[in-house]
Amino acid sequence: MKKKTLFGAALALLTLTGCYNGNQQSNETTSPSFDEVLTTRRSIRAYDATKKISEAEVRELLLATQEAPSWANQQPTKYYVAISEEKLKAVQDMVGGNKERIKDAPVLIVSTFERGKSGFFQGNQTNEIGDGWGAYDNGLSNCYLILKARAMGFDTLIMGMRDADALRSLFSIPESETIMAVISLGYRAQEPRQPQHRPLDDIVKYYPFSCPKACNEHRTGILGFLESTRLIEVLFGVICNQANAQVILIMLFHQIQQLMANALMMIFWANQHIMQVGSHNAIVQRTNHADKFITVPCRIHRLKVPHGHYQFIRKMT
Ligand SMILES: Cc1cc2nc3c(=O)[nH]c(=O)nc-3n(C[C@H](O)[C@H](O)[C@H](O)COP(=O)(O)O)c2cc1C
């Protein structure tokens, strides 16, 4: 009995001092990683009508947008925030076909930028983009907004479909500002579909060295056929007008990724080691540092050739 009383007293003390919470769940919430923020952010087109967002939370969100870079720190972006029922209803009627998608979003934000600031120096346009830099800065700011929103557990939809004139009059937005997007803010009511992303190679070109014109020419003949079948990745050689080619080397390389073993044939040159890997041009550079390789996303890397070390720099398409 005495033991029980002592145990009870100790437990009470621990509970009071916050050292013990029994079977209760910890209140601590963990922040999502940056990658989680990036990959879980999606355009949300159905919101949970039961979940609200406070003005303080909106303020915290918009504070984050001030961390965004802008042309000469001009900070041309401005926000007009609809939280009241009356303003929300009004904005819902100004987003065309988006109305149904955002009808339950508790916050709608109109983003604008002040013209004549970003892209200008002493009143003069700095280059051909002109006020396009204001739109650029606005996009950066909005990017911070949607990512911060996700980090806070919210969801968003950027809407380019909106009635700028009606919004201007609703919020008394000055003519000196260009109205860009309306952004809905709330909690997702359903999981979004995953959008298709273009292959990275379609949108990125690497230029580690200058490449002779021939490198970018379309290939025909047997190599073109092999490439088009995509069964065999052929690292085939140097079509880049090298007069003094010296060494020819043929290697096989298996690429599990494409289910079938892909044969790889390589032809090396002594001087300018430019070759083609399937449909990708590649540059291989002789190096004295056998263990030092640049690792870049490419089909072949850490390539070590007998009787000399070569470094696969990166592919160029
Ligand atoms: C400038 C801009 C305007 C957009 N306008 C609309 C819009 O009016 N309605 C809509 O449903 N989605 C709109 N979107 C969302 C895109 O459709 C969406 O970002 C894209 O399909 C990729 O999907 P994700 O955001 O889920 O990655 C817009 C996105 C941007 C960046």
Image (tube, rainbow, N blue to C red):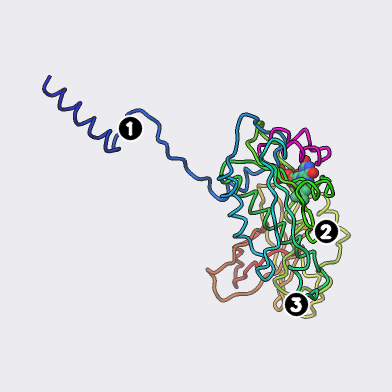
- The residue pinned by badge 2 equals 223
- Residue at horizontal 78 percent and vertical 59 percent from the top: 177
Q: Is residue 274 magenta?
A: no
Q: Position of residue 89 (x, y in %)?
A: 75, 36
Label 2 with label 3: CB-CB less than 8 Å: no
Q: Position of residue 179 (x, y in %)?
A: 79, 54
Q: Is residue 96 magenta?
A: yes
Q: Work out which quarter of the rendered image holds the C terminus and state it.
A: bottom right
Mark 3 and mark 1 lie on one chain; the one further toward the N terminus is 1
Give the camera-side residue of 178 and 38: 178
State the image quarter where residue 83 is shown: top right
- The residue pinned by badge 3 equals 122
Seen from this angle, which residue lies furthest right? 221
Seen from this angle, which residue lies furthest left? 2
Q: CA distance from mark 1 to mark 2?
A: 69 Å
- The residue pinned by badge 1 equals 21
Label 1 amino acid?
A: Asn
Is residue 189 at all visible to an observer of this figure? Answer: yes
